[in-house]
Image (cartoon, rainbow, N blue to C red):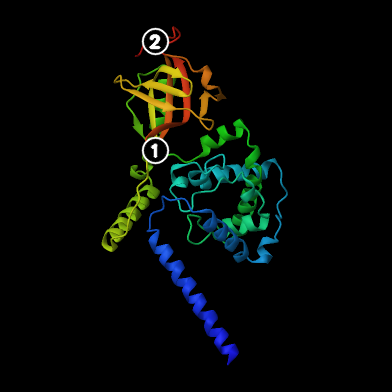
Amino acid sequence: MTLLRALWHGLAVLGLLSLAGALWFASQGVAATPTPGPLETAAARTARHWLVPASQRARTSPEAANEKTLADGLAHWADHCASCHANDGSGDTAMGRGLYPKAPDMRLPTTQQLSDGELFALIEHGVKLTGMPAWGTGTAEGERSTWHLVQFIRALPRLTPAQLDEMRDLTPRSPAEFREEEDMRRFLAGEAPPSAIVHVAPWFDWSTPMTRFAFVRSALLFAVVALLGMPVFAHEGHARKIMGTVAMLHEQHLEVKDKDGKAHVMTLNASTKIMKGKTAIKASDIKAGDRVVATVMTEKDVMIAKEVQVGVNADSKAVGDVR
């Protein structure tokens, strides 16, 4: 009788915990915009670790690491993974930031400390209730490609600028993205006048199947949410690009004027990437009159520059005056 009573008490506690968990989950709504809290993150990572069978976690790569396997892994990453995880593994992409949980920074110990076998299993079989799909093909060739990818993941913290440039050329792009890149190249080189603000809106580029799928999925999700009356949280702002000339640089604030003369003031911070061609430069190297293409995000009503590409100076005598 005592054993039966203890069993009932245990089941009751388990039921209450399950109910509390369900109510908490429902209170969060269906939006993917929030960032999971520390407790949820720790619980999810612990569960993921132990749910990968020990025999899989203990596997080691049968592929000897060399320049060829690393190059194969690099190409595989650029083609399959970079859209969410970014070429450098930071996860700082429109797709990666929109996932729940967000795409992790795979250069950090939370990923690098996983065993090769665990990384292999996560890539091959995916992870439920996340944006991580199963990439396994069930073939020996597919497994070799995954092991090469594991080797490349180990190299993420030490990628060179040359490797990142190579990956940039390998990353799939839509025709609209190709046109945008060519417009930016011509503008920075002084071959064309500045364009108006270009919004980076991959969800509405209908030239790719992924875009059409994402749009239909979002439409269905919003329909379900509307019917259920559940709250939806919107993104604070999408990334956008601003083409123009530098009007002023004061401390960490950069003012850029586009072709219509409209001023855009953005903040440069420690994480802002500033490039001139393929060379990283300092904010102090930016001069008034420089042509720039700035990738910005709005955070709490403040425009933050994520990346600034610097081109020729608008007053340079080396190119024609196309202002």
Q: Mark 2 points at which residue?
A: 320
Q: Give the mark nearest the N terminus, 1 or 2.
A: 1
User: What percent of the width, then of the height, locates residue 175?
Assistant: 38, 37
User: What percent of the width, then of the height, locates residue 64?
Assistant: 73, 49
User: What percent of the width, then of the height, locates residue 19?
Assistant: 44, 71
Tell me the SS state at disc 2. loop
Left-right relation of 199 to 101: left
Please, what is the three-letter code of the amino acid marked with disc 2? Gly
Q: Is residue 109 in sight in this rendering?
A: yes
Left-right relation of 176 to 119: left
Q: Is residue 145 above or below residue 48?
A: above
Instruction: Report how far apart the C-alphas of labels 1 and 2 lie in the structure.
Output: 40 Å
User: What percent of the width, then of the height, locates residue 149?
Assistant: 61, 49
Q: Nearer the viewer, residue 165 or 98?
A: 98
Please, what is the three-letter code of the amino acid marked with disc 1? Lys
The N terminus - image quarter? bottom right
The C terminus - image quarter? top left
Q: Residue at x 70, y 60 (%)?
A: 59
Q: In this view, does 162 lie above or below 187?
A: below
Q: Which of 21 and 137 is in front in this view?
A: 21
Q: Residue at x 54, y 40 (%)?
A: 87
Residue situated furthest bottom in the rendering: 1
Q: Nearer the viewer, residue 50 or 187?
A: 50
Q: Residue at x 52, y 41 (%)?
A: 86
Q: Name the residue under label 1.
A: 300
Q: Is residue 216 above or below residue 269?
A: below
